[in-house]
Image (cartoon, rainbow, N blue to C red):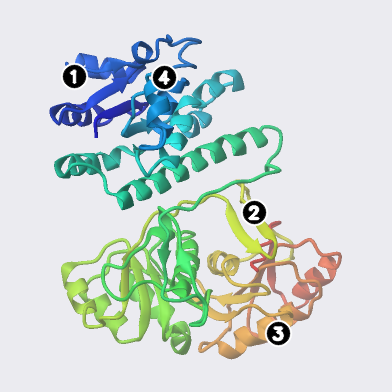
């Protein structure tokens, strides 16, 4: 390497990098704010304007858009040498650029004329030029990669493979940058843009997909997608899906809670004074289904709880923290995946369909619980209804949930008929349903589901309401002295 061009918005580490380049005899081109940083640090460089013979202008909009810059980045060694010599173009071997912070600034209360000034033009143009010519030029777009430059200097330059990998990262960076601008501009007058562009990073190949004959990978840099086990086998495709469901449901609870999920549906949920107590109650709701499940907890896992978890075959355990004793105990189950609970990231949900994708987001909403029957729900019934309703939101439709104040008692998930869902929940329950509460994810179109629940012993029911036959259902509830609450919000989950 002989020449490097440095032009960065994020000045983190740039002085140290420039000093390293200078110490290795590399000539530096720079300008603007980057040049001021280097000058203040006493590092010599050539101003881009002096090199091109063309001054910066238009408040910095034009700095590096010049044939001597782009020719130095695009010129093919041993092919374009003569034309470069004729026009005084110096080959640039290393480009270090990061871009104006459009995404960050778009979140601020800026008008469009002010925001467009954070759309970088020269930076992406140089990055793309250098990345295109990666056979001869190395391009760095991430301050986290400055260490690669030091290593390359020590060994005499970047390898062909290293330049290719840096080019990939460079094109990904400009693609994400343009996507952010496109999405913002398209969203100025629409909740959902006509064109929606997204990028997923950090792709890792999984052993297989939902089934062994399917291929799969996971992408993401945060939340569930970034999860890697503290111990145990690598996460599988289905593990990620189940953990996503478990952590989503767990986030509904502030009290100490255990959530157990199997095949994307909860099979046991409980609250308690201790994490151990909550876990045992949740597991014992359906111990058969808990075999091979994913467990999410919102409290410390200690040795006693680790022993209890080990007593059942569990695929994945996720909790915010573990004692050293607990981790040692769980190592006995060497294949069991143990993860740290992360804060959920939220954002838009994207699901692919043949030929495209569905995108949705859940804006802030408020449920309006109101008792619609002659009898009010008791405080105990309201606590049970609240628990059942939270679980209902994260169970596949159609779903009916029976619960008491501390745990689910019966779960009927994913049925085409709501009555069938109620029957399944009743049949699966290992406990008496006398005095239980029931939740339905959508309105009851007929009184039949309520009547089945009441016959099983339920005394309170929560549902969205909104059916043309609501009054029939209310009359049926009054006839059996059941308290019923309407929430006004439906929670289909397909």
Q: Which residue is mark 1?
A: 43
Q: Is residue 242 above or below residue 101?
A: below
User: Is residue 369 visible to us here?
Assistant: no
Query: Are the two marked residues, 3 and 1, in contact with CB atoms closer than 8 angstroms?
Result: no
Q: Position of residue 169 (x, y in %)?
A: 40, 46
User: Judging from the image, what secondary structure is the residue with disc 3 in?
Assistant: helix
Is label 4 in contact with label 3 (beta carbons under 8 Å)? no
Tell us which disc is closer to us: 4 or 2. 4
Mark nearer the N terminus (3 vs 1): 1
Asked which secondary structure carries label 1, the reply is: loop
- If you read the primary sequence from the N terminus, does the residue marked by circle 2 or circle 1 appear first? 1
Tell me the tag on residue 129: none
Q: What residue is rendered at 72% in x and 78% in y?
A: 418
- Foreground mark, 3 or 1, reads 1
399 on left or right of 235: right
**Element at label 4:** loop
Q: Are marks 2 and 1 in contact (CB under 8 Å)?
A: no
Q: Which mark is residue 359?
A: 2
The residue wearing badge 3 is 420
4 or 1: tag closer to the N-terminus: 1
The percent position of residue 20, horizontal first and vertical second, equals 16, 31
Work out whether residue 347 or residue 119 is closer to the camera in this orientation and state it: 119
- Badge 2 crowding class, 10 Å Cα cut-off, few under 14, some 14 to 19, many 20 or more, is few
> Can you say whether 128 is above or below 457 in the image?
above
User: Which of pointers 2 and 3 indicates the residue nearer the eye?
Assistant: 2
Q: Position of residue 46 (x, y in %)?
A: 28, 16
Residue in front for this viewpoint, 111 or 178 = 178
**N-terminal of the two: label 4 or label 2?**
4
Residue receiving disc 4: 87
Q: Residue furthest right?
A: 468
Q: CA distance from mark 3 to mark 1?
A: 76 Å
């Amino acid at each position: 390497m002989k020449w490097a061009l440095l032009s960065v918005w994020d000045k983190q580490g740039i002085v140290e990098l420039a000093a390293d380049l200078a110490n290795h005899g590399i000539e530096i081109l720079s300008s603007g704010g980057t040049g001021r940083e280097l000058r203040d640090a006493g590092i010599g460089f050539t101003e881009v304007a002096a090199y091109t013979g063309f001054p910066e202008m238009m408040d910095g909009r034009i700095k590096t858009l010049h044939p001597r810059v782009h020719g130095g980045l695009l010129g093919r060694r041993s092919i374009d040498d003569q034309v470069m010599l004729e026009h005084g173009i110096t080959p640039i071997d290393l480009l270090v650029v990061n871009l104006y912070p459009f995404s960050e600034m778009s979140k601020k209360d800026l008008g469009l004329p002010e925001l467009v000034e954070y759309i970088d033009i020269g930076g992406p143009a140089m990055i793309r030029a250098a990345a295109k010519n990666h056979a001869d030029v190395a391009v760095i777009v991430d301050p986290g990669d400055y260490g690669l430059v030091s290593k390359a200097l020590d060994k005499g330059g970047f390898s062909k493979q290293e330049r290719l990998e840096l080019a990939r990262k460079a094109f990904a960076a400009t693609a994400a940058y343009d996507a952010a601008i496109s999405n913002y501009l398209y969203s100025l007058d629409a909740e959902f843009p006509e064109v929606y562009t997204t990028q997923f990073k950090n792709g890792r190949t999984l052993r297989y997909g939902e089934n062994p004959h399917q291929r799969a990978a996971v992408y993401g840099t945060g939340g569930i997608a970034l999860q890697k086990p503290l111990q145990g086998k690598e996460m599988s495709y289905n593990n990620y899906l189940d953990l996503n469901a478990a952590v989503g449901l767990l986030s509904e609870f502030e009290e100490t809670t255990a959530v157990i999920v199997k095949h994307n549906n909860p099979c046991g949920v409980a609250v308690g004074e201790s994490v151990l107590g909550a876990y045992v109650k949740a597991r014992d709701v359906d111990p058969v289904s808990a075999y091979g499940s994913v467990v999410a907890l919102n409290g410390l896992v200690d040795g006693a709880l680790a022993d209890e978890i080990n007593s059942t075959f569990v695929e994945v355990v996720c909790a915010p923290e573990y004692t050293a004793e607990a981790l040692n105990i769980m190592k006995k189950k060497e294949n069991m995946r143990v993860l740290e609970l992360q804060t959920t990231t939220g954002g838009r949900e994207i699901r692919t369909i043949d030929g495209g994708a569905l995108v949705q987001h859940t804006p802030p909403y408020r449920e309006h619980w109101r008792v619609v029957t002659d009898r009010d729900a008791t405080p105990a019934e309201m606590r049970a209804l609240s628990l059942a309703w939270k679980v209902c939101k994260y169970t596949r439709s159609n779903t009916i949930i029976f619960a008491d104040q501390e745990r689910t008692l019966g779960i009927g998930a994913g049925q085409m008929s709501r009555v069938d869902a109620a029957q399944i929940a009743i049949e699966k329950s290992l406990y008496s349903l006398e005095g239980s509460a029931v939740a339905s994810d959508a309105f009851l179109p007929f009184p039949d589901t309520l009547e089945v629940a009441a016959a099983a012993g339920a005394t309170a029911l929560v549902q969205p309401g909104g059916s043309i036959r609501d009054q029939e259902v209310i009359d049926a509830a009054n006839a059996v002295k059941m308290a019923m609450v309407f929430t006004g919000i439906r929670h289909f989950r397909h």
